[in-house]
């Protein structure tokens, strides 16, 4: 009886040890950039064109780029130095979600390559 209890205890401790060592997945930080009036905007800062976006190194990011430009104006999005870009030009009403994790610290430029005035900074701390 003692041996059975001892084995059960060892197995329980082994399961607890392995369960505690599992890596926890961090949910991605969601950032939305809206293209309109030939600029990018954060939805909660509609009066501040091409804002600086600050991220953390190693933090997963879900970046949603949405074209709210009236008419038939196309927009794209790229972050120089991080290999992040939309797969195609976005027409009015379209959006694309870009999932990435910044691997290095620094200041990077983001832009719409179709409109030179649509550029801002992305800072990875």
Image: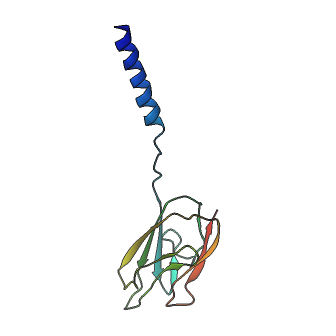
Residue found 59% across the figure and 60% down from its top: 57
Nearest to the observer: residue 81 or residue 79: 81
**Where is residue 76 drawn, in percent x and y?**
45, 84
Q: How is the image coloured?
A: rainbow
Q: Residue at x 39, y 83 (%)?
A: 90
Among the 4 quarters of the image, the one containing residue 65:
bottom left
Q: Quadrant of the N terminus?
A: top left
Q: Residue furthest front?
A: 3
**What residue is shown at x 62% (from left), y 74% (from top)?**
108
Residue depicted at 57% across the width and 63% down the height? 103
Instruction: Identify whether 71 is placed above or below 6.
Output: below
Q: Is residue 8 above or below residue 76?
A: above
Q: Is residue 18 left or right of residue 54?
A: left
User: Depth check: 46 or 111 in front?
Assistant: 111
Q: Position of residue 104 (x, y in %)?
A: 61, 65
Image spot of residue 2 (x, y percent): 38, 8
Which quadrant would residue 122 be assigned to in this image?
A: bottom right
Count of numbered tags? 0
Residue 121 quadrant: bottom right
* Quadrant where the image shows the C terminus: bottom right
Residue reaching furthest to the top: 1
Above/below status of 37 relative to 96: below
> Which of 119 and 18 lies nearest the eye of the viewer?
18
Q: Position of residue 118 (x, y in %)?
A: 55, 85
In the picture provided, is 114 more to the left or to the right than 93? right
């Amino acid at each position: 009886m003692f041996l059975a209890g001892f084995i059960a205890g060892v197995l329980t401790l082994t399961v607890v040890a392995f369960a505690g060592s599992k890596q926890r997945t961090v949910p991605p930080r969601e950032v939305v950039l809206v293209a309109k009036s030939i600029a990018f905007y954060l939805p909660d800062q509609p009066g501040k064109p091409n804002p600086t976006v600050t991220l953390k190194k190693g933090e997963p990011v879900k970046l949603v780029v949405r074209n709210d430009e009236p008419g038939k104006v196309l927009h794209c999005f790229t972050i120089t130095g991080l290999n992040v870009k939309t797969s195609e030009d976005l027409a009015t009403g379209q959006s694309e979600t870009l999932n990435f994790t910044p691997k290095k610290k620094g200041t990077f430029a983001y832009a719409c390559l179709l409109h030179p005035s649509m550029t801002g900074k992305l800072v990875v701390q």
